[in-house]
Amino acid sequence: MTYRVCLVCMGNICRSPMAEVVLRHVLERHGLDRDVIVESAGTGGWHAGAPMDERALRTLVGRGYDGSAHRARKFTDDWFDRYDLVLAMDRDNLSFLQGMAPEGVEVRLFRSFDPASPDRAEVPDPYYGGQDGFDEVLELVEAAAEGVAKHIVDEIR
């Protein structure tokens, strides 16, 4: 059985693709890369087909990750049956996804898997800021990815 995760932000060029790359890496380290498919998407489609934001990519590369293959996609309501877990980067996207989700489908905040983060903590959007925002996003994503991986282990084993 393959477990499937989708990480969702606004445009799918900064936060969710960074989280996708990091979570894949963490899952590989845990020996789960063959059991789990990790994808990302945006609630908006204006960047569909575009690569990751250059600043996001540069931040990942600086820490040894490779996000060069990423192309942005838009999450649509018929995708919910594709995934076992849908994670939003912030409360606005969480609300949007919850409004689309069929009855009984749980959508959670990505940082809810980081035990050190406060309740309802978000991954802030770095798009309109400087490099420090992308560095912060990567730190938050790395912290939460470990918790997501543990959750998946509990679900599939």
Image: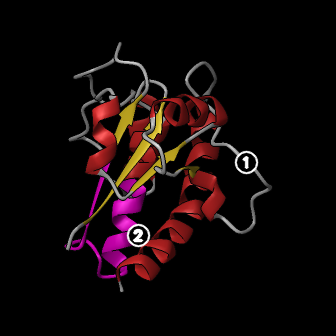
Please name the amino acid that badge 1 sits on.
Ala
The residue type indicated by label 2 comes to Val
Across and down, in percent, residue 135 comes to 59, 44
* Residue occupying image coordinates x 46% and y 30%: 100
Q: CA distance from mark 2 to mark 1?
A: 21 Å
Q: Residue furthest right?
A: 118
Rendered image coloring scheme:
secondary structure
Q: Nearer the viewer, residue 123 or 43?
A: 43
Residue placed furthest toward the top: 46
According to the image, label 2 marks what residue? Answer: 26
Residue topped by disc 1: 121
What range is drawn magenta here?
A: 21-39
Q: Residue at x 66, y 35 (%)?
A: 91
Q: Is residue 47 visible?
A: yes
| Residue 30 is a magenta residue | yes
Q: Nearer the viewer, residue 91 or 68?
A: 91
Vertically, is 11 above or below 80? Answer: above
Q: Please name whichever residue, 10 or 29, is drawn nearer the observer in this view of the structure.
A: 10
Q: Sequence-wise, which precedes: disc 2 or disc 1?
A: 2
